[in-house]
Amino acid sequence: MGLFSRSKEYTEQTTGVIVGVSAVKVNNMNLPLAEYEVEGKQYRVRVPYGIAVKLERQSEGEGKLVRANLNYGNVNVRLQHTKIQGCKVNVLYNPQKPKKAKVVD
């Protein structure tokens, strides 16, 4: 499947809100999680690194420090993310499979 055909599956847009962080790290940063709603059901999607950095730069001095402890089997992972909890983001999603989504500028 090519890039063009993949982008066509995300045809609907909604607003998401940063609610926490994922266990996935890029450049020593845990990627934030955005929560969005489609037809009354909540979903979560990871925010790409570039957008997360941009949000942090735009929210200097605002927001909260987000901390979470997650257990993955025998491993306890401590996560932190600064400043951007509660920030709004644009989410594109597939209307047939709303769980398939991506955060865009």
Image (cartoon, helix red, strand yellow):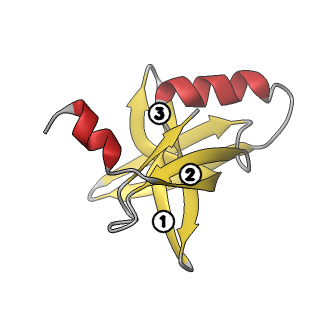
Task: Residue 104 in the image: state x and y as whole percent.
Answer: 53, 37
Whole-angstrom CA distance, mark 2 to mark 1, is 8 Å
Q: Which residue is mark 2?
A: 34
Residue placed at 57% from the left, 68% from the top? 37
* Cβ–Cβ under 8 Å for marks 3 and 1: no
Sequence order check: which comes first, mark 3 or mark 2?
Answer: 2
Question: Which quadrant is home to the N terminus?
Answer: top left
Q: Which residue is mark 3?
A: 48
Residue placed at 64% from the left, 54% from the top? 15
Sequence order check: which comes first, mark 2 or mark 1?
Answer: 2
Which kind of residue does numbered mark 1 sit on? Tyr
Graded by Cα atoms within 10 Å as few (under 14), some (14 to 19) or many (20 or more), the crowding at tag 3 reads some
Residue placed at 57% from the left, 61% from the top? 36
Residue placed at 40% from the left, 65% from the top? 95
Is 16 situated left or right of 103 in this image? right
Q: Please tell me whether mark 1 sits on a helix, a strand or a loop.
A: strand
